Image: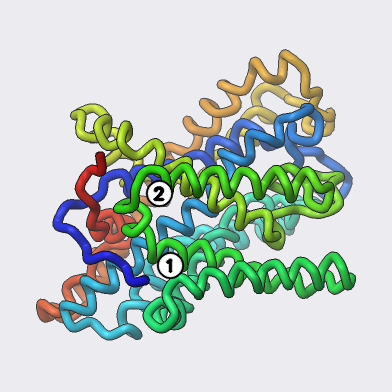
């Protein structure tokens, strides 16, 4: 099977899914992160450990499989366009790595520096753990950078064996789980960081095939994934939650288990079943403006949202004298304050976000000024980090 030729129309639904995936993660972190302050610093937990049945929500809101799937489509389409303009694979991969590595590196280095200064000046314990929690969401960018680096291999497999590559990756992920849980080889589970996320990314190469296929195939993907989730979780072999929950035997995400393969199928089918309605909505002026807005700010927001959350918690402690050592009581009152738990960090994140965007643009302008003018074949590789991906998808005609 080969990827269908790219039609002329851009797929705004791809933009929407990619940006929405990041925003869902941001809102989840703000609303549902519970900090348990101990002698060695803050430890993160969530209401999943205290609320019966809430783990089912993670089957929809753990959206990293869908994000990597969309990323695969973005990369193959972007590469096809870059290749047509004469850009080499090495230049294409390096440019994309640099586009993500620089902004993520800025956030990481700033927090390491700030944490070191605060810890040494005030002689505080637990600062290192606090910094680790703030920068921990960057793990997904590390995986994304790995997938970009492996793009030449993924494209080679796609060309040589097509859909068989997906079968091999899924089978290898299952074998890793068998060795990990059946033979007690715990460390081998980290291979699934490559196999499971590589599968999601590789599946994105077939995005256009999924879009062009009959609607019943979307139902088939959804039901196959759902039955897989029910069977794997219902067997008792895997936790029900698709995110880490303190107290569980292990996490389905760190490292990913075969359950995430079933989750990927379920989410692809679910997203495609929503496509006809969402494409109509995204043509409307308000939805179109919303789509453009979230695409412009989703990645920078993801990079700094925990910084805004840290500022909000610090101000809450400073002004309201909130007792950070008091364990959170997940009761009705706690649930009623969830809107405030989103609004507060959002207000604190906005100035950080605007400052970060200003630094990004100034850095991009300086780099552009220092770079010789590109020939037309190299133009594609000169686009800014966040806007480049949003401009490169080519979509499909609406399917009946």
The figure's colour scheme reads: rainbow
Q: Residue furthest left?
A: 376
Q: Quadrant of the C terminus?
A: top left
- Please name the residue shown 21% across and 63% down the image: 6
Residue beneath label 2, please?
18
Q: In the figure, residue 158 lies in which quadrant?
A: bottom left
Vertical order, 298 against 54 (above or below): below
In-front residue for pair 314/230: 230
Q: Position of residue 76 (x, y in %)?
A: 33, 69
- Please name the residue shown 34% across and 75% down the image: 95
In-front residue for pair 182/111: 182
- Please name the residue shown 78% across and 51% down the image: 238
Question: Does label 2 or label 1 sit earlier along the sequence?
Answer: 2
| Disc 2 crowd, CA 10 A, few/some/many (<14, 14-19, 20+) | many
Q: Position of residue 334 (x, y in %)?
A: 71, 20
Q: Is residue 336 left or right of residue 368?
A: right
Report how far apart the C-alphas of labels 2 and 1 lie in the structure.
Answer: 20 Å
Q: Quadrant of the N terminus?
A: bottom left
The secondary structure type at the circle numbered 1 is helix
- Please name the residue shown 71% across and 36% down the image: 55
Q: Position of residue 318 (x, y in %)?
A: 67, 30
Q: Is residue 238 left or right of residue 228?
A: right
Q: In the figure, residue 230 lies in which quadrant?
A: top right
Disc 2 versus disc 1: nearer the observer: 2
Q: Is residue 335 visible?
A: yes
Residue beneath label 1, please?
102
In-front residue for pair 47/199: 199
The secondary structure type at the circle numbered 2 is helix
Q: Position of residue 285 (x, y in %)?
A: 19, 29
Q: Are marks 2 and 1 in contact (CB under 8 Å)?
A: no
């Amino acid at each position: 099977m080969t990827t269908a030729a790219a039609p002329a129309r851009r797929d705004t639904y791809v933009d929407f899914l990619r940006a929405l995936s990041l925003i869902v993660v941001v809102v989840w972190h703000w609303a549902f992160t519970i900090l348990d302050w101990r002698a060695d610093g803050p430890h993160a937990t969530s209401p999943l450990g205290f609320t019966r049945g809430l783990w089912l929500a993670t089957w929809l809101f753990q959206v990293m499989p869908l994000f990597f799937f969309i990323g695969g489509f973005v990369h193959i389409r972007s590469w096809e366009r870059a290749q047509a303009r004469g850009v080499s694979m090495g230049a294409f991969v390096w440019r994309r790595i640099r586009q993500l590595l620089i902004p993520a590196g800025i956030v990481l280095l700033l927090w390491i520096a700030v944490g070191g200064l605060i810890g040494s000046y005030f002689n505080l314990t637990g600062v290192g753990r606090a910094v680790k929690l703030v920068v921990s969401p960057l793990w997904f960018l590390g995986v994304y950078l790995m997938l970009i680096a492996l793009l030449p291999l993924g494209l080679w497999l796609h060309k040589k064996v097509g859909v068989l590559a997906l079968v091999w990756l899924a089978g290898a992920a299952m074998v890793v789980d068998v060795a990990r849980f059946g033979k007690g080889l715990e460390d081998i589970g980290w291979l699934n960081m490559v196999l499971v996320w590589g599968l999601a990314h590789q599946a994105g190469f077939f995005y256009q095939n999924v879009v062009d296929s009959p609607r019943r195939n979307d139902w088939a993907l959804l039901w196959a994934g759902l039955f897989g989730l029910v069977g794997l979780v219902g067997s008792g072999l895997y936790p029900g939650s698709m995110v880490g929950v303190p107290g569980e035997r292990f996490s389905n995400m760190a490292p990913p288990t075969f359950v995430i393969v079933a989750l990927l199928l379920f989410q692809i089918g679910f997203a495609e079943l929503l496509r006809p309605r969402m494409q109509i909505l995204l043509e409307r002026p308000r939805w179109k403006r919303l789509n453009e807005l979230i695409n412009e700010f989703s990645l920078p927001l993801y990079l700094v949202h925990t910084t805004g959350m840290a500022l909000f918690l610090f101000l809450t402690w400073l002004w309201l004298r909130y007792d950070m050592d008091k364990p959170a009581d997940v009761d009705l009152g706690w649930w009623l304050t969830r809107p405030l738990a989103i609004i507060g960090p959002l207000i604190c994140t906005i100035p950080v976000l605007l400052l970060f965007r200003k630094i990004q643009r100034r850095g991009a302008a300086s780099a552009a000024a220092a770079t010789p003018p590109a020939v037309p074949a190299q133009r594609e590789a000169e686009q800014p980090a966040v806007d480049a991906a949003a401009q490169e998808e080519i979509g499909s005609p609406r399917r009946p």
